[in-house]
Amino acid sequence: MKGSWSTEGEAGFTLLETMAVLLLVVLLASLVFPHFDLVYSRWQEKTALLQILRDLKEAESEAAGRGREMRLVFLAGKPYYQLELGGTVLRRPLPGLTLAGEEEAGDEKTVIKFGAETPEEQAVVLLGAKGRVYRVLAAKGRPPEVFVNGEGG
């Protein structure tokens, strides 16, 4: 009769094998974890920039369709930007990005507008983590673009 504590014919892991696997997991985590902050901040920036591009396309389309001015307003020192159509204001988060030039030039805001008097070319410069500079460009007849540190992105 077999006892309940018998290990004959049973497969399992020894304490040494379990400790070796745990050590490997800890080593891999220690290699990945220091870069998590950078990866997360870049993801936040990319998400915010994609939302800005979508809003620029939508603002241009709405302004043309309604015949009214629509604006994107980027405010110095604020973690958001605003979409404005008449008296309606919608705030969009701007995680990890700040308006460039707010301290040096005393700029309070940058406005990109669409409507009857839309400029040929409009841009806003945003600063990201680790010194990344983003230039968001809206030009008549072309889709909006983002340039990263002087290059197209």
Image (cartoon, helix red, strand yellow):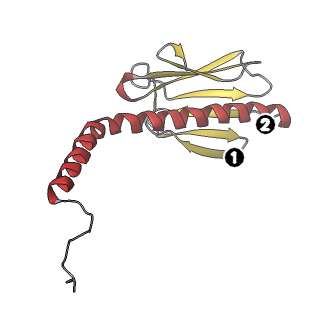
Q: Nearer the viewer, residue 120 or 21?
A: 21
Q: Residue furthest front?
A: 1
Instruction: Report which residue position mark 1 lands on.
Output: 88
Three-letter code for the amino acid on which mark 1 is drawn: Thr
Q: Residue at x 23, y 60 (%)?
A: 13
In-image side of 107 versus 142 (left or right):
left
In-image side of 141 versus 138 (left or right):
right
Q: Which quadrant: the N terminus?
A: bottom left
Q: Residue at x 50, y 38 (%)?
A: 94
- Disc 1, SS: strand
Q: Which quadrant: the C terminus?
A: top right
In-image side of 31 versus 122 (left or right):
left
| For marks 1 and 2 on the same chain, the one whose residue lies earlier in the sequence | 2
The image quarter in which residue 49 lies: top right
Q: Residue at x 73, y 19 (%)?
A: 142
Label of residue 62 in the image: 2
Q: Residue at x 72, y 15 (%)?
A: 120
Q: Residue furthest top?
A: 150
Alpha carbons under labels 1 and 2: distance apart: 13 Å
Three-letter code for the amino acid on which mark 2 is drawn: Glu
Determine whether 141 is above or below 52 in the image: above
Q: Nearer the viewer, residue 122 or 4?
A: 4
- Disc 2, SS: helix
Point out residue 19 in the picture as x, y percentages from the top left corner: 17, 53
The image quarter in which residue 112 lies: top right
Point out residue 144 in the picture as x, y percentages from the top left corner: 66, 24
Q: Nearer the viewer, residue 39 or 143?
A: 39
